[in-house]
Amino acid sequence: MAYTLTTPLYYVNDRPHLGSTYTTLACDAIARFRRLSGEEVILVTGCDEHGLKIQRTAEAAGVTPQVHCDRVSDRYRDLWQRWGISHDRFIRTTDPHHRRVVEQFFARVEASGDVIEGRQQGWYCVACEEFKDDPHEADDPECPIHRRPLEWRDEVNLFFRLSRYQQQIEDLVSRPGFIAPASRRREVENFVAGGLKDFSISRVGLPWGIPVPGHGDHTFYVWFDALVGYLSALLDPSVPVDLDQLASRGWPAQLHVIGKDILRFHAVFWPAMLLSAGLELPERVFGHGFLTREGQKMGKSLGNVLDPEVLLERCGGDAVRWYLLRDIPFGEDGDFQQQRFQDLVNNDLANTIGNLLNRTASMARKWFVEAVPPSGDAAAGDHPLAQACRTGLEGYLQAMDQVDFRRACEAVLQLAIEANGYLNDRAPWKLMKQDGQADVVAADLYAVLETCRWIGLLLAPLLPDLSQRLLSQLAEPAWESRSGGALGGDAVSPWRAALQWGGLPAGRALPEPSPVMLRLELDQPL
């Protein structure tokens, strides 16, 4: 069975931002780890392209909504390619295939008796594409998220009978592990305990959307349409739509990764819709936090938005991935601080990891005919660095299983710290000057190089490019994002099998060392 995980389907009102990049990088790390561990993985991403907000944005730009969507969707595709995202599916909600899936999904929901007509009155945020329950009774209420005026709506819509699923959703959201991190669960439980209300799933007189079959000028509410995109991404567009095929195509998803602002849609509305359609529920919904910059919310009006394209060009993908995964506890809010970003990348990657490999490989080449030295006693499992690697691996695997990237990064970094400490304590540059100590120096250098090999392996899901550069310095093969595959029984993936002490062949020729990570020197604000 495939391990299916999804990013949100990103709304194309504007170009990609750092928040969407953060979510996608996190999902990419999960997907790479699970593939390398021997699982078949389907990573789904894509774009949500309907709704009033898109229509107005296109009108303001003087283009049709479709042209606007094509442009922005292409930017997402291009950016994910440049970041090396290893997604398997990219769905656009303007695809004709998606429309057919939505129509069949709606037919099931309607056949369940869960579609009724009703009047929708209230204050609406176009930016959120959502009615606001509590506009604070102001004369000119505004959205608390976007700080823009709300619009009054009074129209006849189609409603989904969410209230019918009160008990089932209560049971679901209280289930340990369904909502993560645990701090988010209480918020959803309180919302559900207040009583679920039927919600509008259509709009009238909005041409930029999928028409509701059999219901005149109604088009689907953008959220109803977009959530079904997770299913569309899994079904083959070249054959007739059959939702009963989802079980063999990777549904249910094991993990939806989203921003915390859309948690209710994924943890409450979406499961109820799936229940109505007779489909299985996702196993887990993970709502991560928001990113700020130097303690301030990022926004165009403040001029402090971090552009992921600029970050990639000026800093490189490894630096940004490391900072976001290493410094921000996944699930909590995080603050991007430029000085800390530079310091962490330089200290952790350039100095602690990069310099460790560079100086050790240089000594090995100088004293042992440009090759990996003889291992001697260092190949034994009781070597201090062997023990450190095994301990680090245990913590790393636990952390990655729990999508605790920070702890996983720290486990890798700790191996480099211990190897540096061992190298400094043993001081091979001194021992080599003493008669009869060449075998001791050889074993010491072997142990450090073998630890570097482990570091390169463990970095493969987190920093795939740096991992490849590091391993190439040891003449080791790179671990591609799609290597491995589904394994049966008790079989161990090649990547996991490689995480055995003593796997670096003694006598292997070592290439000329070169820095695997250049220092960041940011003299101007990003």
Image (spheres, grey):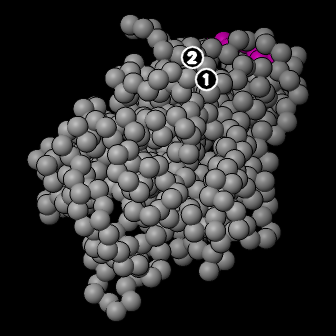
Q: Residue furthest left?
A: 167
Identify the secondary structure beneath mark 1.
loop
Q: Amino acid at mark 2?
A: Gly
Q: Nearer the viewer, residue 5 or 477?
A: 5
Q: Is residue 435 left or right of residue 141?
A: right
Q: Residue at x 63, y 38 (%)?
A: 85
Q: Are marks 2 and 1 in contact (CB under 8 Å)?
A: yes
Q: Amino acid at mark 1?
A: Arg
Q: Quadrant of the N terminus?
A: top left
Q: What residue would you read off at disc 2? A: 484
Q: Is residue 29 above or below residue 199?
A: above
What span is in magenta? Answer: 371-377
Residue 447 forms part of the magenta stretch:
no
Q: Position of residue 213 (x, y in %)?
A: 38, 44
* Separation (CA) of disc 2 from disc 1: 6 Å
Identify the secondary structure beneath mark 2.
loop
Q: Residue at x 70, y 11 (%)?
A: 505
Which label belongs to residue 482? 1
